[in-house]
């Protein structure tokens, strides 16, 4: 666009403009609030003047950060208050605006930063200046062309020669200071949460950086990233209840996977030696600060490794991910500073439980005896809980809350670990470890069971637990047993809860703070659709028009 008096809003083409105006948003199925209706009217006024408030394309020559860098690079060659001779076009959301006589000061924000617009009536022209003042609102996406300069107040700015509407926002942005403080509303309307809170955008940028670091760590060590089925004819690989669905074409029940494990280990049978997958798992369970029914899991498996070598790998992985994400191998979570540097202490599960509550589960080999001992120690355990679940409750209630520094709990009972290999010197326990940090479990790992007949016997034991009331016991996966019959090499395997790791790296108290769109209960719908009613009512406190 040329300088001085140019057209300041992008025009639509003839019949298209007429068509859009004819299908005006007046009378929508959803009742609009007064503020939404006011903004809708401005969109209609743009259409009536031949301007599409939602044009198909935008033009951009520089991001806000690139424009700033460009000006800083050439500023020394300019006279005081001089401007860049080359025109620059930026795009972004209109986040501030103030009007002073014949001048409008505004800021556009894009993904890289913000840049001030300096718009004068005599440069834009009367009609364009009035349009920018009266038909544009905070929250609108805008394209601006002009020349960079530094104002007398010292701020690098774009002296606008043209502005264009890119997308008219019918909702005003959340009010700057108090707009989005309700936690549940933040989860339900994450888009508004991100719009209002720079800290939330930072958290999810760090999440992405952490996942990239996990991939880099494994890629550098020769692991192959693979994809296994999310929709499975039989679930397994963890103790959990699945989500169930029906496949119409196959007329068959399917399950959303609860873990990737059994498919990944099939790949080691097939000849791959190092594999990993980062993907969504689903467990039909309760929701709390550490649990979400949909979550992200990293699982990786290495042939010819065992749980001891995998502990060393996990230590190195967490240190590298923290360093790449935070700049150092330490983190601060809820006021506690933790050094992640190796070597992490190793404690057996049996010792940890006995030290914490005085119960030695080996001395109580039957369900009734262990239940009585657990309750005598103060554990809250239901009467019908099976033996391995009682052990797990002792861990959760007495041990886990006190594992603040990075720690590996190792050597679990066979009954609690149906996919892990027995210890050669103690066949009642398996080679399993779990990394704990800040009172929470962030992973699970085994020397993998590769004896097909032992595996079948473990599955059958799980079925006995299911018959005794354990709804999370694994079903028998005959095809997986058949795969093991072809032979699987000695293997070490690890699962890392990505969301829990990100919680710690970003100092967030709840797993829902690191999941962009967490599962939520439906809103009540008095007199209609609850979500629609909330939108129309303007549930988020908003900035001025």
Image (tube, rainbow, N blue to C red):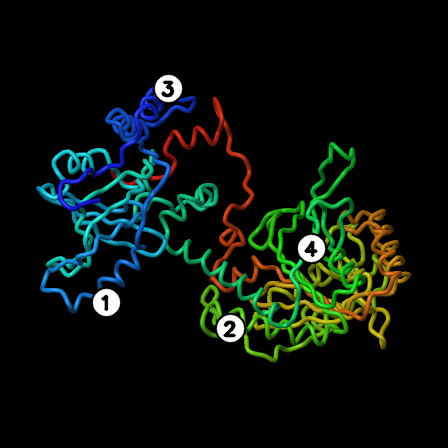
> Which mark sits nearer the N-terminus, 1 or 2?
1
Whether tag 2 and tag 3 are in contact, CB under 8 A, the answer is: no
Q: Where residue 397 appears, x then y in whole percent?
A: 66, 61
Q: Residues within 10 Å of mark 2 (few under 14, many from 20)?
A: some
The numbered dot on residue 380 is 4
Mark with earlier residue (1, 3): 3
In the rendering, at what x and y percent does residue 506 appear? Answer: 47, 62
Write down the residue under mark 1: 73
Q: Quadrant of the C terminus?
A: top left
Q: Residue at x 27, y 41 (%)?
A: 138
Disc marking residue 338 = 2
Q: Quadrant of residue 260?
A: bottom right
Count neighbours of disc 4 (C-alpha within 10 A) and say few if under 14, some if 14 to 19, many if 20 or more. Answer: some
Kindly indicate whether the residue at mark 3 contacts the one at mark 4 (C-beta within 8 angstroms).
no
- Which residue is disc 3 drawn over? 27
Q: Is residue 527 left or right of residue 361?
A: left
Position of 518 compared to 5: left or right? right
Secondary element type, mark 1: helix
Q: Nearer the viewer, mark 1 or mark 2?
A: 1
Q: Nearer the viewer, residue 95 or 23?
A: 23
Q: Are marks 4 and 2 in contact (CB under 8 Å)?
A: no
């Amino acid at each position: 666009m040329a300088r001085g008096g140019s057209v300041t809003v992008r025009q639509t083409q003839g019949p298209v403009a007429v068509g859009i105006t004819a299908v005006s948003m007046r009378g929508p199925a959803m009742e609009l609030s007064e503020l939404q209706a006011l903004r809708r009217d401005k969109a209609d006024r743009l259409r009536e003047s031949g301007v599409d408030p939602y044009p198909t394309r935008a033009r951009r020559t520089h991001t806000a950060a690139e424009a700033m860098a460009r000006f800083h690079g050439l500023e020394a060659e300019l006279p005081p208050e001089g401007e860049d001779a080359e025109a620059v076009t930026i795009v972004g959301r209109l986040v501030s605006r103030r009007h002073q006589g014949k001048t409008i000061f505004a800021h556009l924000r894009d993904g890289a930063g913000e840049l001030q617009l300096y718009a004068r009536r005599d440069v834009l022209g009367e009609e364009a200046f009035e349009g920018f003042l009266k038909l544009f609102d905070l929250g609108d996406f805008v394209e601006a062309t002009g020349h960079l300069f530094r104002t007398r107040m010292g701020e690098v700015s774009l002296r606008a020669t043209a502005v264009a509407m890119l997308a008219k926002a019918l909702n005003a942005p959340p009010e700057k200071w108090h707009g989005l403080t309700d936690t549940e509303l933040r989860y339900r309307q994450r888009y508004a949460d991100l719009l209002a809170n720079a800290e939330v955008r930072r958290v999810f940028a760090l999440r992405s950086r952490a996942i990239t670091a996990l991939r880099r760590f494994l890629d550098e060590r020769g692991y192959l990233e693979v994809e296994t089925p999310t929709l499975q004819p039989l679930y397994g690989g963890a103790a959990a209840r699945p989500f169930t669905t029906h496949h119409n074409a196959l007329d068959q029940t399917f399950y959303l996977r609860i873990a990737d494990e059994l498919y990944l280990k099939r790949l080691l049978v097939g000849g791959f030696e190092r594999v990993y997958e980062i993907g969504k798992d689903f467990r039909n369970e309760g929701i709390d600060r550490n649990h979400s029914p949909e979550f992200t899991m990293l699982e990786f498996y290495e042939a010819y490794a065992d749980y001891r070598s995998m502990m060393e790998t996990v230590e190195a992985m967490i240190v590298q991910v923290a360093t790449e994400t935070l700049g150092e191998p330490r983190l601060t979570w809820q006021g506690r500073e933790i050094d992640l540097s190796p070597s992490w202490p190793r404690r057996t599960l049996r010792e940890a439980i006995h030290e914490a509550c005085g119960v030695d589960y080996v001395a109580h080999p039957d369900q009734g005896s262990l239940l009585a001992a657990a309750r005598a120690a103060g554990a809250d355990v239901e009467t019908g809980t099976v033996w391995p679940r009682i052990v797990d409750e002792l861990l959760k209630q007495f041990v886990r809350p006190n594992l603040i520094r990075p720690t590996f709990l190792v050597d679990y009972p066979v009954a609690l670990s149906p996919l892990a290999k027995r210890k050669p010197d103690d066949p009642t326990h398996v080679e399993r470890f779990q990394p704990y940090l800040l009172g929470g479990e962030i992973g699970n790992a085994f020397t993998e069971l590769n004896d097909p007949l032992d595996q079948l016997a473990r599955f059958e034991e799980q079925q006995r637990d299911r018959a005794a009331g354990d709804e999370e016991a694994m079903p028998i996966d005959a095809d997986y047993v058949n795969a093991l019959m072809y032979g699987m090499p000695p293997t070490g395997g690890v699962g890392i809860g990505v969301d829990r790791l990100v919680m710690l790296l970003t100092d967030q108290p709840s797993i829902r703070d690191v999941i962009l769109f967490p599962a939520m209960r439906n809103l009540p719908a008095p007199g209609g659709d609850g979500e629609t009613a909330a939108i129309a009512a303007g549930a988020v406190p908003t900035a001025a028009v």
